[in-house]
Amino acid sequence: MKKYTTIWTGVIFLFLFPFSLTAQDPPAYAVENVTIHLADGSVIQSGTIVWREGVIESVGANPSIPYDAFTISGGDSLHVYPGFIDGLGYWGTPDLPDPEQVSDPGNPGYERAGIEAQRSPEDLELDGDEITEIMKLGVTTAAIGLKGYMLPGSADLFFLNGDHTADHLFRSSVGMEFALEGAAGGWGNRAYPSTTMGVMARFRQLMYDAEALKDHIEYFASSEGSMTAPKRNRILEAMFPVMENEIPLFLKVDSPEDIDRMLVLKDEFDYDVVIVSAKNAAYKAEELKERGIPVLVSIDLPEKPGWMEDEDSDPSGEEEELYRQRQAEAYRNAAHNIRNLLDHDILVGFASTGLSAKDFHEKILALKEDGDLSEEEIIQILTVNTASVLGAGSRIGELRSGNIANFTLFNSSYFGEEPEAKMVISNGVIHEL
Amino acid sequence: MSFKINVSTIVLAALLLTVPGEFSFAQATGSVLIQNATVITVSGDDLENTDILVQDGIIREIGQNLNAPRGTGTLDATGKYVLPGIIDAHSHLNGIGINEATNPVTPEVTMYESINPNSVSIYRALAGGVTTINLMHGSANVIGGRNATLKLRYGLGQNELKFKDAPQTVKFALGENPTRVHGQGNGIQPRTRMAVETVIREHFDEALDYRKNREAYLEAKERYDQNPQGNPPVPVAKNLRLDVLADIIEGNILVHCHSYRADEILMLARVFDEYGIENYTFQHANEAFKVAPELAEYGAHASIFADWWAYKFEVYYSTAYSASILNENGVTTSINSDSNELIRHLNHEAAKAVHYGQTSENDALRMITLHPAIQLGIDDKVGSVEIGKHADLGIWSGHPLSIYSINEKTLVDGVVYFDREADPDDVRLDRAIDPVVDYDDTSQTFYESIEGRNYDACMADVFMLFESSDNRQSWNQQIHNH
């Protein structure tokens, strides 16, 4: 008990100072005597993690703690998990403005049409409180995208750090979000494109225009004679990295039919893709496997049909009883979406895509209870798999020496009723939340 | 339960046909010997006590006392009638969106990208002997989206519903719908029928200019890329909308034009004549009978209702003799549904042409088989019972024009997709069952769900666009406030 108190005094002491690594900070840190859950499912009892200048130096049952490390003892009761990674979330990003009425709905301009490929969270002020909420749930790294419609912008990968998240950009433009989402506005003030087929056509035209501009820029740069200068366009030019396969399109779709539609466009333009959200992607598992397309999956399983939770709810007759059988099967299929994707050896990471922080832990537990996933599989989806989809598997996702120090100390197993984060280490910075 | 087995079998068959790495057009076909039927060939005489041998989805032999090759099953059709699968040249049966109603000209969109393969309405249409539909874009725009020619292979995915090698068709619309949506609703052209013509002409001219410029650019680009001498060409971006319009003018895309009044029907025929556009179809065309000789001369087709009118001002002048008059004047005429209810008994609609205008039975049946096939450019594949054509067939309990006859089995490519004897209680596909939708919300009757025939399916979801933007804003506000 005495030891435990000492630890927390030490932690509190730490938080009296700025968290960023400065000359005054200890050169290294260690947490010892904690239960370490590794991404591969193995567990180290009474383990120790040492990190220096943001990078993990050692992880194990008994590594030596350097003389210059500030040591925090877990008191034998804390559980450490690798920092969870959100493959696409909107944490801290601004809400969408109400759409304006346009005088010519067929020609609303790029922004009103929902085409804002040039936008990036890097350039915006992020709401630190919302980010802190998700850090408490164990998320240390997130590809933050922007709320929007068809092409809301690119997603940037941040180490989460409350109000200071913008200072901890890990990688910019890890993906360009694309959804089959018409322009803002209801039936009173809609604008082009307003249908799925309209979005597909508008996307094609955008790519054709971008191709022409790219050619023009290249011709102009190489030409020595007289040539009309290209009219530059930030939105079209934001698509160039997609065209050159430097960044993938994050295709935000759920139904097998919409996945089909997106793959039609992929085949036409040959860009790299990641399927995001993918709530019913299991219907397309064979094809996704065949094409080697990774998935950043939503963990937002549908609500259970009311009667499944109500023992007193009797069907009104044979017809309803048969319907319930089919509904139960449909629920099971939806709940087993991730299970089926994994069974097809598809690389499955995680994306919150609008999930609220307050539902996060409950949804994780549902994956285990209703989704037929093991704790190890869930942790892998939340860590190494997502890192791998984001192309950052060599730096984040696992607790191993050389990786960025991202992990969370919980007071219990993450799969308990209400695990509480005691400390979050993100990009080596300690946060007591 | 038997249905589950049926659908699973179909889907399994499709999966087995799917070659890894090739994901499009995995289409199930069947082989069967239909025996001893009265075959209504539609293209020729009716044949009694006749067998039809189907192999791999194609009609291979028609005759008497044919033998089934080893492994080919038989269907005894003694006392039954075989009719070519009914083709509905105007349907919005299973679109996820019908109208890209935000611009007067939108041929860049295509209903092939708006297919809902899970709609139970597909099964209901099959029950009426329908095997092919023209899934049309709506009529909000002067030049709407391209349409999708589909085979009703219920249970398969959207790619498998596509009618392979069917020509592309596109929706045009004249009259009230486009003038009200864009003129009255948004205050932009067209506000009048005159302006509808202008919109068409201006876009055609723009498309012709574009194609010339684009082709010149592509040639110059090829030359420059091979030998970068002199000034490089200034790129002309590919333009999907104008490309489709240019293809229409070049005859690569067939026009199906929503229309009612004789004056505007003639207007479009004259405009098309100027641009050299042929082989097009007027849809609805309630007043086409007034200009039937002219349409015959232009080679224009008509796809009409048997006796449906007076649902808006421009549709008041009509007659139940319309199909017969057009037919007598040599206009290739079909009778369509434009309705998820009517599509289930298009045979009754065809019978009205016999009843009112004394059209011959065979001609009346052509109006729901061969003629719509001609209008969709697929008459070399379907529309009649002929050797070499697809085995898209309905097996009827009696003559299809009798009010007492019912369709008992529907085959598409030789595969049975509807069988009245094995008709299950719940025909919804597994993937169409939503786990969060309660039973009470699913028990609406079919007729309630489609609102009877009380609305114009061509304007699905966009009626409110008839109102001015100010009115719409005000409604939005009221809804928001309440």
Image (spheres, rainbow, N blue to C red):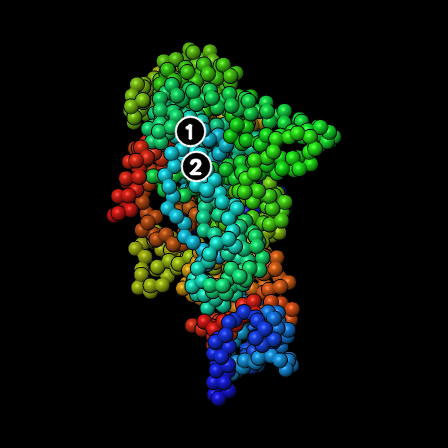
- The chain identifier of the residue carrying mark 2 reads A
> Which labelled disc corresponds to residue A108?
2
Establish if A19 lies above or below A334. below
Q: Residue type at mark 2: give it.
A: Pro
Q: Nearer the viewer, residue B425 or B205?
A: B205
Q: Residue at x 39, y 48 (%)?
A: A97
- The answer to whether residue B248 is visible is no
Report helix, strand or loop for mark 1.
loop
Is residue B34 placed above or below B318 in the rendered structure?
A: below
- Subunit that carries the residue with mark 1: B
Residue A157: x, y in percent?
55, 58
Q: Point out the frontmost of discs 1 and 2.
A: 2
The residue that appears at 33% across and 63% down in the rendered structure is A310
Real-space CA distance between mark 1 and mark 2, rounded to the nearest whole angstrom: 14 Å
Estimate the x, y position of residue A245 in percent, counting from the top left.
63, 47
Judge if badges 1 and 2 mark residues of a common chain: no
Q: Is residue A269 visible?
A: yes
Q: Which residue is mark 1?
A: B104
Label 2 Cα neighbours within 10 Å, binned few <14 / some 14-19 / many ≥20: many
Image check: B50 left or right of A404?
Answer: left
Picture coordinates of residue A308 (x, y %)?
37, 61
Q: Which quadrant of the view contains residue B215?
A: top right
- For residue A62, which quarter of the picture? bottom right
Q: Residue drawn at (47%, 52%), measured in percent from left and top? A: A146
Q: Tell me the number on the disc at residue B461.
A: none
Q: Residue furthest bottom?
A: A2
Q: Position of residue B170 (x, y in %)?
A: 48, 27
Q: Please give left or right for residue A69 compared with residue B254 in the image.
A: right
> Amino acid under label 1?
Pro
**Relative to the observer, which residue lies in front, B372 or B213?**
B213
